[in-house]
Amino acid sequence: MAASNENLKDMIGQEYKDGFVTDIESESFPPGLNEDTIRAISAKKDEPEFLLEWRLEAYRHWLTMEHPEWAFVEFPKIDFQEISYYSAPKSMADGPKSLDEVDPELISTYNKLGIPLEEQMRLAGVAVDAVFDSVSVATTFKDKLYEAGVIFCSFSEAVKEQPELIKQYLGTVVSQYDNFYAALNAAVFSDGSFVYIPKGVRCPMELSTYFRINAANTGQFERTLIIADEGSHVSYLEGCTAPMRDENQLHAAVVELVILKDAEIKYSTVQNWYPGDENGVGGIYNFVTKRAECREDNAKVSWTQVETGSAITWKYPSVVLKGDNSIGEFYSVALTNNYQQADTGTKMIHHGKNTSSTIISKGISAGHGQNTYRGLVKIGRKAEGARNYTQCDSLLMGDQCGAHTFPYIETKNPSATIEHEASTSKISEDQLFYCMQRGISAEDAVSMIVNGFCKEVFKELPMEFAVEAQALLGISLEGSVG
Amino acid sequence: MLKIEDLHVSVEGKEILRGINLEIGAGEVHAIMGPNGSGKSTLSYILAGREGYDITKGRVLFNGKDLLEMSVEERAWAGVFLAFQYPVEVPGVSNIYFLKAALNGIRKYEGLSELDAMDFIATVKGKMKELDMDEKFLYRAVNEGFSGGEKKRNEILQMSVLEPSLCVLDETDSGLDIDALQIVAEGVNRLRDPKRSFVLITHYQRLLDYIKPDFVHVLAHGKVVKSGGPELALELEEQGYAWVDEKKAS
């Protein structure tokens, strides 16, 4: 389909629209990592002793660890001494008490990204925590949520105001020794969001965190902890963007979800970190550990991710199904265009009886993009009646890209039911021609076909974000090969 | 409406159409018949603008404009519609969404505003009823899992919603049982209009029992070897296509 390839290539290559830099005075630590760096971060945040100790234990363990090499991604060795581990706008140093005291430059940054922080301008049903480099700038609707008993604040604030909850739950899903990047994160994490939904409460609004990397040469090490107490329910969304820069930047986050009896967390991600340019220069390394634990009976968690950004995406939002009858779901769309690489998927670890998990993964590769699905379904000895359904589809656009699938299944219980379906397809010339013959432009046709391919995942996203995700997919594919 | 002049088309160096001349006036129905491999489908693809063909000679005028210079979408916007021999499946895209996108593409070209969703659905539902199509087809993915007959009916539905001025039907009768054929033919007949022209590409005379053509052309070896009225189709039915080869031999 050489001729239509040309048509598609000619289509306007829209630039990464969130690639601007906020001109703001920042306080950044000089590059380098040692125990003093960690003490300094901890001191900056005025942390209790136990947390500093926890960080240092993680760091000491990290020093003994080897960089993992098993993923299907390629990048030059990262020099961890060349990264700055803390950067915050100077204006945040005094700890502004309300939005009125926050630097207008920061507020306008979020306005530009379409995330107004003034509550009256927000979509009525969504509260936002805005994280800029290493600090949380503002959290909206905090008071209103507090009335409902919901705690939604920055991680740093939670450390100060809810030390008991932090002590009780931090590192209980992803330990500070879990893996190379999780250990690094535990040592140097700066900020992120904290959510606690008390017993029996259905969170009255959607919660969201918007992560923005702005400063150059810094790493962002966010840490998010969400606890859904018995019978509670919350829907949470995270969004991510970064400026266009020629050098790669590291984003190594850890997200822990704890779900207790009869509770449910719905966690959605629209990841649009800067992906690098069309020659593969620059972009974010998005190396993230996300895990949920259905700790008690009838707990349910659902991960939905739309990954269109980042030079490299390397993550497996996972679920440990401990409680009987607990449910884990993973819905993913990962798109790689130009020279982007993704090695993503999930792990479903079944321990409880009659636990069930669903995995729907849609990988789209265009340009020279490499897209890997890697998933583990593990059924423990006691997981009587466990069930898993996995569906894993790849869509290729052009002949320079790749799609790879590595499903792992381990079962120790003969009563388990495991289903796996996989497909690989191309956008065919027939489909494009058919749509265009009906008066749908090539560009709209590609976006329609791709959105159709992703439909099962998009329908899991909260309404307003589904629209955003569809638009994002259209933009990310512009100028790509059909 | 449509004027094809000395059209020569090759695929990978092999000449498929060798000098087609055809003139189709507004409101006329032309049937193009011929044996397999005569170039019938190629002609339909050339009119719709499919890639992969070398037009080595000739021109095609559509309402006085050079059709071959226009892109696939531009032709659709200008009123050229091709009912596919093998309608394509578009998984995950609902029929209603697809129809709406297509119609709005055309309306945009005509400088009209997008259609109101309620009006649109009401119009489409009315047309579906005429084609004996269940409303549930609106919410199913385009052609996905449709039977052969359902796919063809869906093509006619699209045609009746988009209201093109030139309808090219490529072997729409193939794979249809007699009931489905009747429904499809009635759908086409309802669309007959002094301002709308049809090109019916078919192998068999059967379709022409239900849609009466004004002219019949026989295509063989890339050329129109005979043109006439509806009686020519009956003649073909009796004699088969063998005489076409004889004609070539002589």
Image (spheres, rainbow, N blue to C red):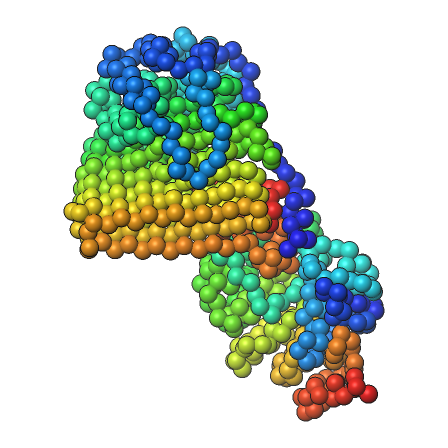
Q: Residue furthest top?
A: A94
Q: Nearer the viewer, residue A452 or A230?
A: A452
Residue A185 pos. (x, y %):
35, 24
In the rendered view of the protein, which quadrant contains the N terminus of chain A?
Answer: bottom right
The image quadrant that residue A330 belongs to is: top left
- Residue occupying the point 18% across, 38% down: A296
Q: Residue furthest bottom?
A: B238
The image quadrant that residue A80 belongs to is: top left
Residue A138 pos. (x, y %):
41, 19
- Left or right of B133 in this view: B250: right
- Residue occupying the point 23% across, 15% down: A50
- Residue occupying the point 53% across, 52% down: A449
Residue B102 pos. (x, y %):
60, 55
Q: Nearer the viewer, residue A93 or B228?
A: A93
Q: How many marks?
A: 0
Residue B130 pos. (x, y %):
54, 71
The answer to whether residue A240 of the structure is visible from this angle is yes
Q: Nearer the viewer, residue A317 or B232?
A: A317
- Residue occupying the point 60% across, 44% down: A480
- Left or right of A227 in this view: A110: right
The answer to whether residue A143 of the structure is visible from this angle is no
The image quadrant that residue B223 belongs to is: bottom right
- Left or right of A74 in this view: A431: right
Residue B161 lies, with reference to residue A206, above or below; the image says below
Residue A12 lies, with reference to residue B153, above or below; the image says above
- Left or right of A443 in this view: A98: left
